[in-house]
Image (tube, helix red, strand yellow):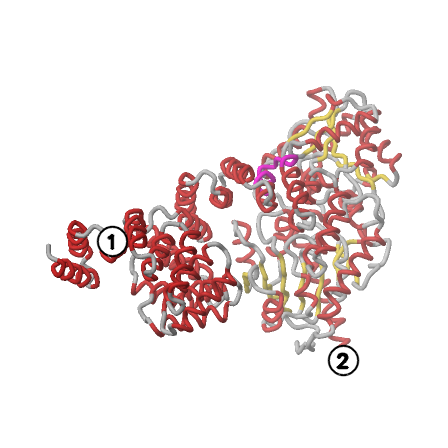
């Protein structure tokens, strides 16, 4: 082929190349090289065409040959840098782009490639300078503006990055990558609506970009558009089925929407695709927990911890799953591991305290919660939990607990009380009252069962009942409470401020706290004084310590020997409790001792009430009553052995102690068929648990203490006409229990008659219970009305 023909062929090849007809261009480049193997430009552009066609290694070979023949070709050096960048050869890209700049200092594309190589190597400051130099030379270099934005974003200069992406888009409105990158930085800035718009623009130009759909899903998820996010993740997978992080994000999003089976499938796919994918193992554990598959969740968490043993959150979540399985020792170990990694991990300390509470380690639990309170002093819930835990600590007196309640009031009550608005309720002492009840326990719960008789028997001609419910999982009892109320407000998701406003708008005259410092309380609502009269009752017999709750309902056995001791005024009814078996039909059986020949003592109370002083006193009883047994209710774990160790030191052999695990209500009540006498714990007596025992025919021996929670047995047994079962000292306690155990005819008589006593007493007289409480409300209301006229 003559030289002129070679040139013509080369020029025609360039035309095809520039028109995007790569195959035709390559044929002509090869023809040129067949005639003139050393044609530098044909080698160069054959390499460029090969790169554009995805054959990068061949491209590198061709462009290198071109440079050998023409080392001063700045464009060839720059294009070789481009190919090297595409194949992960950043170091060589840096060398080639730098050589291009030496040959031609004003070459914008060479500066651009220099910046890209520097950025790839993590030299961001230098990369930023290189991109800026490229833009000085060529201000309309859209790619340089886009890549400069990427570097600025990585340097944390987000506003400048946004400006850089916008500059790229002004120059090239169809630049999908710039819109995608703009969306990323906007999302990082929390500007989710704008990010979503940017991603959608990018997808209009590149509708099959799995990466952009993934980013869109993340922004939609963060904006609360969960179903749209799921749809975006599914599209991302359609176009990029190997992108495991999208399966991860899809699984998490599906889990949050309750689509658990699909979530598990997506997360398992991610984990199978990469067995060392920590996030997939961890998030799979989270969703498996939500689906109730605890064993699989625990295995998934353990795998995650093998991969990343330095992540405290993983041990925390593992502990939660183990705790839900009531594997208390394992849960405690997991929480302790989390705390070893992060000593100020408040949630882990808090959960560890819950485990210790379940194991009867009340004082250790209280100290752990106190540490959490020190880490989060502005959280009223944590401080309330501390106050509640202090109730089970035998070493503390009432003054110490009252002091903690005063601190709660000073921190969370007094500031709101100062801001309380005046009330405009009609101060008519005889009118029909609007009574609001606030509780998370309008459900099948010990408190709900105790309150249902009151709600059934309320005099609706005198009082209109409004329930502000914190129940998240309603049940049959919830529906019965709802039927008893004139108005019902689902308040679980209302803020304290919103709930207080709602109560004020409802015109409530008397607002009743049914929880005190127990879980789910809304004491910060009461601190805002949304009602003119505020009363505490039912959660447990004690004061809230909250100055805004000025009244408390109790009975004379619990509190009659002293005044309230704090800011609340006491109103007395016959009994703090009104028992209702709530549909459980269970016969009273024969006295177990008559069949077994041995007396079985028992305590089926929450194990947090079982402390060392209690066990030592019970050991004295067991030592006095030959061959007697003791039945205790608690989950499996090392605390059972600690219990046996305490009793062994007091001379009681392990074979005399039996443990049973908590069961659903009917099965729990059936445990009393194995018990002859209940031994009441202290300082926190059995409350409804003791009433359960008495209803099954099992007498309770109780030690009367000074605190109201230590006088529940005194109240219940006095109201049953059984004062002989109430001890005033530990010696009395041993003597009463021993004497009763030695009198099987008396025990049999009590077994046969206790249910009848219960049913005939104020302990099960629902109409009387309701009338006494209503009378207390009316008296409190009348005092408020008088005060308004003074």
Between 173 and 712, the residue placed more toward the observer is 173
Whether residue 186 sits left or right of residue 351 in the image: it is left
328 within the magenta span: yes
Q: Nearer the viewer, mark 1 or mark 2?
A: 1
Q: Residues within 10 Å of mark 1 (few under 14, many from 20)?
A: many
User: Which one is earlier in the sequence, the residue at label 1 or at label 2?
Assistant: 1
Tell me which secondary structure the magenta stretch mostly adopts.
helix
Whether residue 503 sits left or right of residue 193 in the image: it is right
In which quadrant of the rendered image does the C terminus lie?
bottom right
Between 437 and 82, the residue placed more toward the observer is 82
Residue plotted at (59% across, 40% down): 309
Residue plotted at (76% across, 66% down): 547
Whether residue 65 sits left or right of residue 573 in the image: it is left
Q: Which residue bears the numbered disc 2?
A: 789
Q: Position of residue 436 (x, y in %)?
A: 63, 64
Q: Which residue bears the numbered disc 1?
A: 43
Disc 1 is placed on an element classified as helix
- What segment is highlighted magenta in the picture? 320-330
Q: Position of residue 583 (x, y in %)?
A: 56, 43
Disc 2 is placed on an element classified as helix
Extreme-bottom residue of the structure:
789
Any part of residue 636 in sight: yes
321 within the magenta span: yes
In which quadrant of the rendered image does the N terminus lie?
bottom left
Q: Position of residue 481 (x, y in %)?
A: 56, 55
**Quick check: 8 above or below 501?**
above
Residue plotted at (30% across, 48% down): 61
Residue 737 sits in quarter = top right
């Amino acid at each position: 082929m003559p030289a002129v023909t070679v040139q013509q062929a080369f020029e025609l090849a360039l035309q095809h190349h520039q028109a995007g007809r790569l195959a035709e261009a390559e044929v002509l480049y090869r023809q040129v090289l067949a005639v003139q193997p050393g044609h530098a430009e044909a080698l160069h552009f054959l390499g460029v065409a090969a790169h554009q066609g995805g054959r990068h290694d061949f491209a590198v070979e061709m462009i290198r040959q071109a440079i050998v023949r023409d080392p001063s070709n700045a464009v060839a050096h720059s294009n070789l840098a481009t190919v090297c960048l595409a194949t992960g050869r950043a170091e060589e890209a840096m060398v080639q782009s730098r050589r291009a700049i030496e040959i031609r200092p004003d070459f914008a594309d060479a500066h651009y490639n220099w910046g890209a190589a520097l950025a790839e190597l993590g030299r961001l400051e230098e990369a930023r300078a290189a991109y800026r130099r490229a833009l000085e030379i060529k201000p309309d270099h859209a790619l340089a503006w886009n890549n400069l934005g990427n570097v600025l974003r990585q340097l944390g200069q987000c506003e400048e990055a946004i400006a850089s992406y916008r500059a790229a888009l002004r120059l090239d409105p169809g630049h999908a990558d710039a819109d995608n990158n703009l969306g990323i930085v906007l999302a990082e800035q929390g500007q989710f609506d704008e990010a979503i718009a940017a991603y959608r623009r990018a997808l209009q130009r590149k509708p099959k970009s799995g990466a952009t759909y993934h980013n869109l899903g993340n922004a939609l998820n963060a904006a609360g558009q969960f179903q749209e996010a799921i749809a975006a993740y599914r599209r991302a997978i359609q176009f990029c089925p190997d992108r495991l992080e999208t399966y991860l994000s899809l699984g998490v999003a599906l889990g949050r929407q309750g689509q658990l089976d699909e979530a598990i499938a997506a997360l398992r796919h991610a984990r199978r695709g990469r067995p060392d994918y920590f996030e997939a193992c961890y998030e799979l554990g989270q969703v498996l927990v939500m689906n109730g598959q605890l064993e699989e969740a625990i295995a998934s968490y353990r795998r995650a911890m093998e991969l990343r043993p330095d992540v405290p959150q993983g041990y925390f979540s593992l502990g939660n799953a183990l705790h839900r399985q009531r594997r208390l020792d394992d849960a405690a170990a997991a929480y302790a591991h989390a705390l070893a990694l992060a000593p100020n991990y408040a949630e882990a300390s808090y959960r560890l305290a819950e485990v210790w509470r379940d194991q009867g380690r009340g004082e250790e639990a209280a100290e752990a919660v106190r540490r959490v309170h020190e880490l989060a002093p502005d959280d009223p819930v944590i401080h309330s939990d501390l106050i509640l835990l202090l109730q089970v600590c035998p070493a503390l007196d009432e003054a110490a607990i009252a002091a903690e309640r005063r601190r709660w009031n000073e921190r969370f009550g007094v500031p709101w009380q100062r801001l309380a608005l005046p009330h405009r309720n009609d101060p008519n002492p005889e009118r029909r009252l609007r009574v609001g009840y606030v509780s998370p326990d309008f459900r099948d719960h010990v408190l709900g069962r105790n309150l249902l008789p009151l709600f059934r028997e309320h005099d609706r001609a005198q009082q209109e009942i409004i329930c502000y419910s914190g129940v998240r999982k309603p049940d049959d009892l919830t529906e019965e409470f709802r039927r008893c109320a004139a108005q019902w407000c689902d308040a679980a998701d209302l803020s304290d401020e919103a709930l207080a406003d709602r109560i004020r708008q409802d015109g409530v005259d008397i607002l009743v706290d049914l929880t005190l410092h127990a879980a789910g309380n809304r004491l910060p609502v009461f601190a805002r004084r949304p009602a003119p009269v505020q009363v505490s009752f039912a959660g447990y017999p004690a004061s809230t310590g909250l100055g805004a709750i000025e009244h408390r309902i109790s009975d004379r056995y619990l509190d009659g020997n002293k005044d309230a001791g704090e800011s609340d005024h006491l109103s007395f009814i016959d009994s703090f409790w009104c028992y209702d078996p709530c549909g459980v039909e269970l016969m009273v059986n024969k006295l177990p001792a008559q069949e077994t020949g041995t007396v079985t003592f028992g305590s089926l109370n929450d194990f947090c009430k079982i402390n060392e002083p209690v066990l030592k006193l019970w050991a004295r009883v067991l030592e006095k009553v030959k061959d007697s047994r003791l039945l205790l209710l608690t989950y499996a774990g090392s605390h059972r052995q600690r219990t046996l160790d305490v009793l062994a030191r007091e001379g009681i052999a392990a074979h005399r102690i039996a443990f049973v695990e908590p069961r659903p209500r009917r099965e729990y009540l059936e445990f009393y068929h194995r018990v002859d006498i209940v031994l009441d714990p202290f300082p926190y007596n059995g409350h409804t648990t003791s009433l359960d025992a008495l209803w099954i025919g099992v007498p309770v021996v109780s030690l009367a203490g000074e605190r109201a929670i230590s006088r529940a047995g005194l109240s219940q047994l006095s109201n049953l006409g059984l004062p002989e079962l109430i001890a005033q000292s530990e010696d009395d306690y041993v003597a009463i229990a021993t004497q009763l155990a030695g009198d099987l005819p008396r025990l049999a008589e009590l077994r046969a008659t206790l249910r009848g006593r219960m049913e005939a007493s104020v302990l099960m007289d629902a109409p009387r219970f309701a009338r006494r409480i209503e009378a207390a409300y009316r008296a409190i209301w009348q005092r408020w009305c008088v005060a308004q006229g003074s």
